[in-house]
Image (cartoon, rainbow, N blue to C red):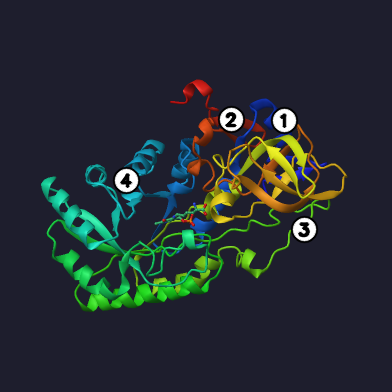
Amino acid sequence: MRHFHYKENQLFCEDVSVQEIAEEFGTPLYLYSKQQLIENYRAIDSAFADVDHITCYALKANSNLELLKILAKEGAGADAVSAGEIHFALKAGFSPSKITFAGVGKRDDEIEYALKKDIFSFNVESIEELAVINEIAGRLKTKARIALRINPDIDASTHPYISTGLKTNKFGIDIKVAIETFKYAASLPNLLVDGIHTHIGSQILKLDPFIQTAQTVVAMIEELRREGINIQHIDFGGGYGVTYKNAIKHPLLPVEEASNADETPGNNAFITAVLPILKQAKCKLVIEPGRSIVANTGVLITKALYRKDNGVKKFVIVDAGMNDLIRPSLYQAYHQIIPLTLNNVENEIVDIVGPVCESGDFFARERTMPLVKRGEYVAILTAGAYGFSVSSHYNARPNAAEVLVNGDKVRVIREREKIEDLK
Ligand code: LLP
């Protein structure tokens, strides 16, 4: 996250002091770097430069319209999981010919909406869904381009809640019945069977599950071609993990204990590992990265309200809660937390907790970090993905504001909700 850095012990985003932004716009506040977003997108997209491909950004990671507009302008496609996300993608300027529609539970009206918008592909997740799309396409006198999402039963070694490629997960079509399901799909008159889709999970840090999946997909395409089903595109999904620990290093910050399991295999290693395999199928390639494009583009700024020491534990209570960023509560996810201003004080061991009435409302537990006093700000790092997009109004808390930094300019890209806005 090179666009977030300390200058004379003050955290900067690009050319602006984050402390000044926090004072001006208030907290809790999501803050994004435009340059980081563009750099992340280009790094991934350029890794595929020599193949016909679309980098379909997974909107679920962060669907702020202004961020979407930047990606659309870069030429990205969109991976949507609801009619609402297709609507956002179109509004932001993504071409319908670059929109994929995934999800195990597409409603009839959502299918109809997507057909009318003539999107690139439906990533179909069940046999019943095939029949429904065929029926609706027939009624609309059109044909639906589809890919079948295959569940390859491959362990992505990630948190169980975000593992999607195992037999025990609800996603995709069981690999054992994949060929016959493709044949069934090809027999339906209003479907154009165009692709094969996989997405085995999120925050994956090992290369092996991706390599195995790529091999499975290529073998399946060969078999399908022998059966007369000519697959034109592979949608390889997303899931490329990012580094959460030691995202920002500084001599006054404690070094966070990290094992191999916390490290990504390096720039574009995921892509370099699978590309030679996938190329063998001579298909158009689609990928659906979410986190790897936006996670380190954003931070959540929050202010310390109170300190408390009960003799057993020390707590710092901040003004952001699990309703603003649920990842630590839901997945025991680790986010580095750093002060906006580094003073030369010793570290302490604290829990950083929010104001929500749940013991699960925490951002860090037993964390060694610089002492934070009432009124001081901290940044929760790598919060650009699955941060705001998963936020809620729990405890009747209005949504945080979002701002975008571009060089020395700061722009509000979502107004802070007011109490009167709550319905
Ligand atoms: N494609 C499909 C079909 C997906 O379901 C997902 C994410 C992606 C692409 C993008 O995956 P990514 O590149 O971002 O890993 N809320 C969780 C993550 C949920 C992921 C859901 N699906 C978290 O905060 O870790």
Of the two numbered discs 3 and 4 on the same chain, state the one appearing first in sequence: 4
Q: Is mark 2 within 8 Å of ligand 1?
A: no
Q: Residues within 10 Å of mark 2 (few under 14, many from 20)?
A: few
Residue pointed to by mark 1: 20
Q: Quadrant of the C terminus?
A: top left
Compared across the picture, whether 284 is left or right of 156 comes to left
Q: Earlier in the sequence, mark 3 or mark 1?
A: 1
Q: Residues within 10 Å of mark 4 (few under 14, many from 20)?
A: some
Q: Residue at x 88, y 44 (%)?
A: 344
Whether residue 89 can be seen here: yes
On the image, the x and y values in percent for residue 348 come to 81, 49
**Residue designated by label 3:** 255
Q: Looking at the picture, which amino acid does disc 4 mark?
A: Pro
Q: Which residue is mark 2?
A: 411
User: Which one is in front, 80 or 117?
Assistant: 80
Say whether residue 248 is visible. Answer: no
